Image (cartoon, coloured by chain):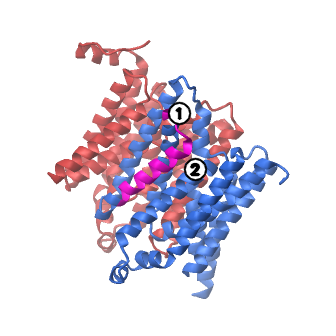
Amino acid sequence: MNPTLSPNPIADLNALFTFPFMVNALEAGTIVAVLAAVVGWYMVLRRQSFAGHTLAVMAFPGAAGASLIGLPTTLGYYLACGGAALFMRGARGSLRRGPGTETATIATVQTVGLAAGFLFLSLGNSVLGGTETLLFGTFLGVSRGQVLALLIVALTAIALTAIAARPLLLETIDPEAARARGVPVALLDAGFLLLLAAAVAATSQITGALLVFALLVAPAAAAQQVTTRPGVGLALSVAFALVIVWLGLGIAYFSTYPVGFYVTSIAFAVYVIARLTRRG
Amino acid sequence: MFAHDFVRNAYLAGTFIALACGITGWFVVLRGQLFAGDALTHVAFVGAIAAAVLGFDERVGLFALTVLVACVMAALGQRGQADDAMIGTVFAWILGVGVFLLAVLATSASGGNGVSAANTLFGSIYALTPGGSRLAAAIGLAVALAVLLAVRPLLLATLDAELASLRGIPAKGLALAFLVVVALVTAESTQAVGALLLLGLLAAPAGAAHRLTARPYRGLALSALIAVLAMWIGLALSYQIASLPPSSAIIGVAGAGYAAASVLGRLRSRYTA
């Protein structure tokens, strides 16, 4: 099969939906886009991009380790990301030396995780087909089961975010006021990191561990350039993410180059345009 | 073990790379610029792939692209607010371009394969040539000396920007110069420990030193010492255990050092406070 663009856009759209793998990919992409946009909006507001990136990278040792000992890869994603979130949270609770040391902890967690992933990979060389897929993702071969699992994770995560939306916002913008009002700050902090871990683990199954950021940061950052109102910003962030994923998958279907390139490029374009419109 | 040429080359290059990483990393941690360093290490990967596609020497691509992106980040970084998100967006895109180049490389006639990409990502210190390792050592030493020569103004500009500008230290120029130095270290160390693992060599020894002492000179020395020790022990471990890749071993040792330092620091603050 080698799809080519015809002059008829309707036929092209129909072609997109003829193959089940493409339908699965579009569904998974849509779910992941909504989840990443919502959680990413909070992440950008909380300035936790570095922590987010580190969690994203943990998907790599997770998947490599799981396939080494024979667990399902998806389980490895969630376990490694969740574990790293708890570890970073634990290390952060005991810090009094300022922001520099905190980022040092995050960076150390990140590279030790990657080093472990590389070790797992070289131990079980034949088991895992390709570092590239783990790091840079693929949208081929998303199964029905995976779509369903993504949907459950996304619905749970978004429901949790919705319940905690207002206190989380308050805690993000003004931790002192939140503490005074009796908001459980420590619990929210830890809870958000776990939520971020779940979102990242879900996203990286489609985009790969290194390109999660395209969906996590870019739509949210673009939305925050355009508006400061939380509700509008969240909606806008979701809209941007959907456009990025749909366009990216659509173009990748008709081209020989990897989906990650298109998704990140469109995401970057959206961010640049949002930044320019604010200036003008 | 030192009878082998490749081991001697690895130790020569590794020692000076670790020295440069330890000293530069101490300032990176102090200035809270690890995320920028993280982005630069990923850029280094794309630079190497780009050089392979265009048919340049790998080092040209590494140095050119990392220094360029460092300059861009320094220029855009003065506005404060959007920093974090901007770094994230830019480097996600650059990685995306890297994926594209990887695909171009895989389909091109010159026949690149996944191995070269994996080498750039995770390093191959045992594959260094004698000339390459001597060059790496020279660059590492030069970078370390450059940072040490600028220690006083750099410290002042980091800790008290107002006072520094009163004394006539060009803070903006210094920030740019420092990011360029980080870029140089990144580009150089990518060949040894790989683009993805290099951040550990910047962060872990420096973070450990910051936890153990607040004094600048002692911290710098400690950071350099831990980095070099991690390199030596890691290389020796991976030589003894065949299935352990050298970069995993180095980062593993550095990470263990960081964990030990944070436990030690915590114990000490409990008993002295």
In magenta segment, residue B68: yes
Q: CA distance from mark 1 to mark 2?
A: 21 Å
Q: Chain of mark 2?
A: B
> In the image, residue B146 lies at what x, y percent?
53, 68
| Crowding near the residue tagged with mark 1, few <14, some 14–19, many ≥20 C-alpha atoms within 10 Å | some
Which of A194 and A8 lies nearest the eye of the viewer? A8
Image height check: is A110 above or below A257?
below
- Mark 2 residue crowding within 10 angstroms, few (<14) / some (14–19) / many (20+): many
Query: Compared with residue A72, is residue B123 higher up or lower down, i.e. above or below?
Result: below
Q: Residue at x 42, y 38 (%)?
A: B97
Q: Amino acid at mark 2?
A: Thr
Query: In the figure, what tint was chain B given?
Result: blue
**Residue type, label 1:** Thr
Q: Give the number of the disc on residue A133.
A: 1
Q: Which residues lie in the magenta part? A: B53-74
**Magenta region's main secondary structure?**
helix
Rendering coords of residue B181 (x, y %): 49, 62
Q: What residue is at 72 percent from the left and 52 percent from the top?
A: B10
Whether residue B206 is situated above or below residue B127 in the rendered picture: below
Let me know if residue A172 appears in the view. Answer: yes
Q: Are marks 1 and 2 in contact (CB under 8 Å)?
A: no
The picture's colour for chain A is red
- Helix, strand or loop at label 1? It is helix
Give whichever of A181, B117 is nearer the camera.
B117
| Residue wearing tag 2 | B190
Q: Position of residue A62 (x, y in %)?
A: 58, 44
The subunit carrying tag 1 is A
